Image: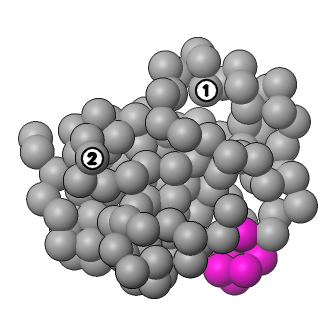
Amino acid sequence: MRLGDIRGPAVVNLWAAWCQPCRQELPAFQWLATRAGPAVHVIGVDTRDDRDAAAALGSDLGVSFPMLVDVAETLRIQVRSPGLPSTILVDGAGRIRHVHIAGALDEAALADLVQRYLGVQVPA
């Protein structure tokens, strides 16, 4: 899958089971997937990780949004993110509007990014 193939708006979260800030923020992405419904696609990309550990963490946290695996870190390298977690906001035309690389997001910060860069108000 390529970012240009995504027709959004969409929020793509790059994460790994070994990344503590990623573990901290995954519930906020599940919250977004539940609250935004079909208005915003939420996609997780397990990056440079062990599939079993990622699946176990997703299950433990009740993650139900789609998850992809990118062992080679192709997407992280493509968007020039220095590390994890990283969050990519993609508009309806498949264009990257913003890449957040400043640490773990909570629900309020995530809702603010979605409003600011994708123009979608997330219901409280």
Q: How many marks?
A: 2
Q: Quadrant of the N terminus?
A: bottom right
2 or 1: tag closer to the N-terminus? 2
- Residue 78: image quadrant is bottom right
> Which residue occupies 65% across, 51% down?
45
Q: Is residue 72 visible?
A: yes
Instruction: Decide: few, some or many residues near mark 2? Use Cα within 10 Å; few <14, some 14-19, many ≥20.
Output: few
The vertical placement of 85 against 118, above or below, is above
Percent x, y of residue 2? 66, 70
Secondary element at tag 1 = helix
> Which residue occupies 27% across, 72% down?
118
Instruction: Decide: few, some or many residues near mark 1? Use Cα within 10 Å; few <14, some 14-19, many ≥20.
Output: some
Residue 88 located left or right of residue 1: left
Q: Nearer the viewer, residue 89 or 23?
A: 89
Residue that carries the numbered disc 1 in the rendered image:
58
| First to last magenta residue range | 75-82
Q: Nearer the viewer, residue 122 or 5?
A: 5
Q: Look at label 2 and name its amino acid.
A: Pro
Q: CA distance from mark 2 to mark 1?
A: 21 Å
Percent x, y of residue 63? 50, 28
Q: Look at label 1 and name its amino acid.
A: Gly
Percent x, y of residue 61? 52, 22
Q: Is residue 100 visible?
A: no
Percent x, y of residue 6? 50, 66
